[in-house]
Amino acid sequence: MFTKVLVANRGEIAVRIMRTCKSLGISTIGVYSEADAEAPHVKMADEAYLIGGPRVAESYVNIDKILEVARLSKVEAIHPGYGLLSENAEFARRCEQEGLIFIGPSSEVISRMGSKIESRKTMEEIGVPVVPGITYPLVDAEEAVQVADRIGYPVMLKASAGGGGIGMQIVRSADEIRKAFGGNQKRATDFFGDGAMYVEKYVDNPRHIEIQILADGFGNTVYLWERECSVQRRHQKVVEEAPSSFLDEVTRIKMGEASVKAAKSIGYRNAGTIEFLVDADKNFYFLEMNTRLQVEHPVTEEITGLDLVAEQLRIAAGDSLNIIQSDVKLDGHAIEVRIYAEDPKTFFPSPGTITKLVLPEGPGIRHELAVSDKSIVTPFYDPMIAKLVIKGKDRNEAINRLQFALAHYQVQGIKTNIPLLQEVAAHSAFRSGDTTTNFVEKYLSRINGQ
């Protein structure tokens, strides 16, 4: 096992990774921007280094500066967390060139799966179902219209790179494509440095269900059941839970086996997630692969009893998996909600100083956060300040505990999205499992501002 690991991230995920490292006797190196000098992850690290100004480009995605710290602190490995540089193939490649272990898949695999177009092509070749669409970048809006006319409306206009709903839009006519193409392409270029766009058929009223996998360097791969992430706002996840209340056992196994097949076909190593769209008839279609730890990984940990960060570290250190598929048990039900520093009515970010923070306590309640009383929430980073993770013996108990926890979660000094989460948790459609990707638009129009 490693003796020293650099955590190339910030916020709750940096704290989360450091917690597991410390439990394994691994020293941690933190990095921080000028805006994060007093952040919890800086205080938790055994050593911490300033790497630049408050803006992400000046610090957390400055590859040269992070590698300089890695050399100075003499670490053996770098954990990228999620977001920032976690799916940056160039960063993984530079780590490899420096003789550092990147805790994730190889740079080649990241590059291959980082392109939605390339990953679609790969899945088609190995027989994993994909949504009808194209596997080449569009030249312009007129070519997009021609493709959409052939596929049939509505379609999804999507950026090949990145995620988080950026560069993505449902379009229902040729005129809508012409209006949407340029703006989405520009956003993709600005955010990801890649303006490649493609079109795929829009699956009506689908579920967004993903499969967590672990793969070692010896050809062993397992799936750790599924997470349903269908409750979304503008293609960004709001609530994640495991297992899905929609899948039957046959479909669950089929999706798991397809995910293992996909991972093995590309020589995948470490933790990863295969995302699918699932229609009303339980047909599933490959959406994309996330070559990193997911924000919602705690719900998988809760239902399997595994520490996914510990598994990542062991795999990266050269160990083989110590479990086989039959060892992976499904225990209870878990739900995660993301706490954002944002106005629940306008969804604008709400930076400021947290003047009071009271966390709910009770059976099945887990917190992942990197703020406290007097913490300053800056405008420079993603507004997620915490994750609330709930476990129950079944889905009904988990929802009851979620409602209790949200009712007793106090954050003062800034606005948060807790009112939205409370409305989701209390809605009869959520309790009944009617959680398609249209949930917010269909049931929460007052809060969604529509």
Image (cartoon, helix red, strand yellow):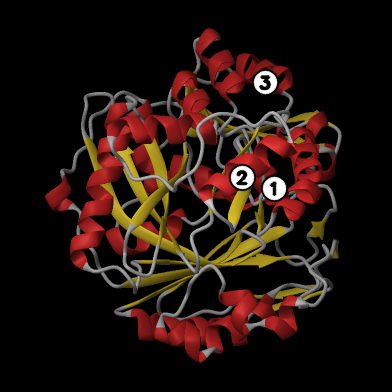
- Residue at 63% across, 32% down: 85
User: Disc 1 marks which amino acid?
Assistant: Ile
- Quadrant position of residue 346: bottom right
Where does residue 250 sit, x and y in percent of width and height?
Answer: 18, 62
User: Is 71 on the left or on the right of 223, as rendered?
Assistant: right
- Mark 2 vs mark 3: in front: 2
- Mark 1 vs mark 3: in front: 1
Circle on res. 166: 1
Q: Which of the image's four quarters has the C terminus?
A: bottom right
Circle on res. 395: none
Say which residue label 3 marks: 69
User: Disc 3 marks which amino acid?
Assistant: Val
Q: Which of the image's four quarters has the N terminus?
A: top left
Disc 2, disc 1: CB below 8 Å? yes
Say which residue label 2 marks: 163
Would you place residue 408 above or below residue 295 in this image?
A: below
Where does residue 43 sit, x and y in percent of width and height?
Answer: 67, 45
